[in-house]
Image (tube, rainbow, N blue to C red):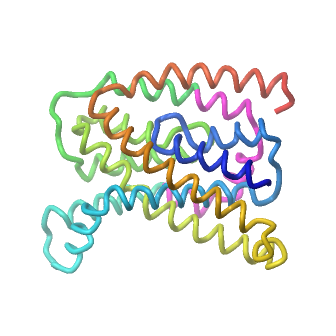
Amino acid sequence: MSIIEAIILGIVQGLTEFLPVSSSGHIELGKAILGVEGAGDLTFSVLLHGATVLSIIVIFRKDLAELFSSLFSFEWNENTQYIAKLALSMIPIGLVGVFFKDELEALFSGRVALVGCCLILTGGILFLTTLERKERKEVTFKDAIIIGLAQAVAVLPGISRSGSTISTALALGVAREKATRFSFLMVLAPILGATLMEFKDLLEVSGSSNVASGGLLLPYTLGFIAAFISGLLACKWMIRLVNQGKVIYFAYYCFAVGAIAILFGLFGGG
């Protein structure tokens, strides 16, 4: 992977992580178009996810500071209940990561047609936003489990995590701003954990000859920075889009790109 390819993929990751168009799906499409191959592809994808998670931390730093301080209050208040809901929502994707890790890695192997099908499915999921209820409630413990299941399904390349979780929350009647906040905060621990594990595996397998010498370190670092900066911009944009009720427009984008990806996969050798 060249430096330019890493930067391009980093920008793609940052822009698409928060927009409901599937970052993993676009990363796979980007790899197919650029012809990027290699055993470290999944690790690079997870590392880019870590960069965008860092952008979440920056944007929601006040919320996170308030929640973190509540951990030491030892009281069952609104903040500690919210933390419990976040933890509950992480269980499904944690189980998927532990028991189906090898199967998931096989899905991230340049299957462009599969990505296209999942993008079309994402478009369908985004239509759930039209089922948005009017009650504008807070996230309940039951909602947290359901939204967590939606996030677990979104590990498939082409299924948008933000699209799945936010659409599900809106369909359950959660207020727009609260749905976006919960969706972004619930991904922190799973992606950070996966990033650390995959980066550890990369160091063990590749060794200093590939990483420390610059074979992977420089492209990975620049890709990380590109993903972080573009992620900051996309996260703020997504928050505005959800509050304005414009998420549905991304469904048409997913349908179009998904169809193109299927054709590319079938007739372009992907």
Q: Nearer the viewer, residue 166 or 1?
A: 1
Which quadrant of the structure image shows residue 165? top left
Residue 168 sits in quarter: top left
Q: Which residues are magenta?
A: 93-119
Q: Kindly report the secondary structure that dominates the magenta region of the rendered protein.
A: helix
Residue sitting at x 62%, y 50%: 10
Classify residue 37 as left or right of residue 42. Answer: right
Is residue 108 found inside the magenta-colored segment of the image? yes
Q: Position of residue 129 (x, y in %)?
A: 35, 27
In which quarter of the view is residue 102 placed? bottom right
128 versus 213 height, above or below: above
Residue for point 33% across, 40% down: 239
Q: Is residue 189 rendered to the left or right of residue 46?
A: left
Horizontal relation, residue 6 to residue 158: left or right: right
Q: Residue at x 78, y 70 (%)?
A: 214
Q: Nearer the viewer, residue 214 or 244?
A: 214
Towards the viewer: 146 or 121: 121
228 lies above or below 213 = above
